[in-house]
Image (cartoon, grey):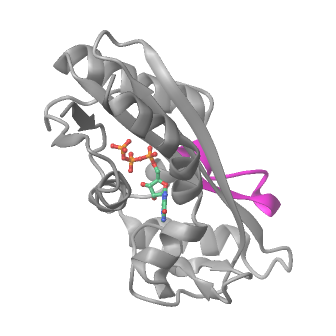
């Protein structure tokens, strides 16, 4: 069984990634907490590559990283790659987003996730991107999930991410979609 380090410090993401990876035979390990990668890239994919490659090289193990965020159409794509840095906690980030969007009738937004698997030598083995289109609600709804989930409404499910079960979010979310693209190749790599 090969070891795979899950290169995230975000507990909400970690929980989802562990759930997806439970479908594979990789033996999961947590990223050493002191190993913090600076996100200097200018896209989700660049930042996911930085995290996966640096954590793989530092630990000498396979590593998987996700860089993700929420892009709001009427805010020219903000907060985008700065979604984690948009406020000091989830509550402040949601408040700021709702304040900046105000009563704007254009509520279109999308969640984006870039996921990268790196080899123990720090080179890239696999990458995939998933997108989930939705709308920003005027106020939060639901208690599940993490981050911006309570204000992100998915029309095809008629509920917010925070009103979905983990299984339903897995089916529809940006992260679930990126993971679905990687799954067959991840399973093939397990036994090489
Ligand atoms: P790591 O880099 O350690 O993985 P992070 O939280 O800094 O953790 P990102 O730089 O990728 O990760 O920032 C993503 C932010 O976007 C995250 O902090 C959330 O605020 C938001 N986000 C991403 N996926 C989300 C989801 O499924 N639901 C709600 N918010 C999400």
Query: Where is 60 relative to 79, above or below?
Result: above
Does residue 80 belong to the magenta stretch?
Answer: yes
**Residue 20 is drawn in which quadrant?**
bottom left
**Residue 34 is drawn in which quadrant?**
top left
> What residue is drawn where x is 55% and y is 31%?
127
Residue range of the region highlighted in magenta in the rendering: 70-82
Q: Quadrant of the C terminus?
A: top left
Q: Position of residue 36 (x, y in %)?
A: 25, 30
Does residue 187 belong to the magenta stretch?
Answer: no
| Residue 62 in sight from this viewpoint | yes
| Residue 22 horizontal side relative to residue 50, left or right | left
Query: Where is 56 relative to 144, above or below?
Result: above
> What residue is drawn where x is 63% and y is 50%?
130
Q: Position of residue 30 (x, y in %)?
A: 17, 42
> What residue is drawn where x is 28% and y is 21%?
56
Q: Nearer the viewer, residue 62 or 147?
A: 62
Q: Quadrant of the N terminus?
A: top left
| Residue 51 in sight from this viewpoint | no
Q: Position of residue 187 (x, y in %)?
A: 40, 39
Q: Nearer the viewer, residue 98 or 115?
A: 115
Question: In this view, which residue lies farthest toward the right?
Answer: 105
Query: Where is 62 relative to 109, above or below?
Result: above
Q: Position of residue 160 (x, y in %)?
A: 58, 83
| Residue 137 horizontal side relative to residue 35, left or right | right
| Residue 53 horizontal side relative to residue 82, left or right | left
> What residue is drawn where x is 42% and y is 12%?
123
| Residue 115 horizontal side relative to residue 6, left or right | right
């Amino acid at each position: 069984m090969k070891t795979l380090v899950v290169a995230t410090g975000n507990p909400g993401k970690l929980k989802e990634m562990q759930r997806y990876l439970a479908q594979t035979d990789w033996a999961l390990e947590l990223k050493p907490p002191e190993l913090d990668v600076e996100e200097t890239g200018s896209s989700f994919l660049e930042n996911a590559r930085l995290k996966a490659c640096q954590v793989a090289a530092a630990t000498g193990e396979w590593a998987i990283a996700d860089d993700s965020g929420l892009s709001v159409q009427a805010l020219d794509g903000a907060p985008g790659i700065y979604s984690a840095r948009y406020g000091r906690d989830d509550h402040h980030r949601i408040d700021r987003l709702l304040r900046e969007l105000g009563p704007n009738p254009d509520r279109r937004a999308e969640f984006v996730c870039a996921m990268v698997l790196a080899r123990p030598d720090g080179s890239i083995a696999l990458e995939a991107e998933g997108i989930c289109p939705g709308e920003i609600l005027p106020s939060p709804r639901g208690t599940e999930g993490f981050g911006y989930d309570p204000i992100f409404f998915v029309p095809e499910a008629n509920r917010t991410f925070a009103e979905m079960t983990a299984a339903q979010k897995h089916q529809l979310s940006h992260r679930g979609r990126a993971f679905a693209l990687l799954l067959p190749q991840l399973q093939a790599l397990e036994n090489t």
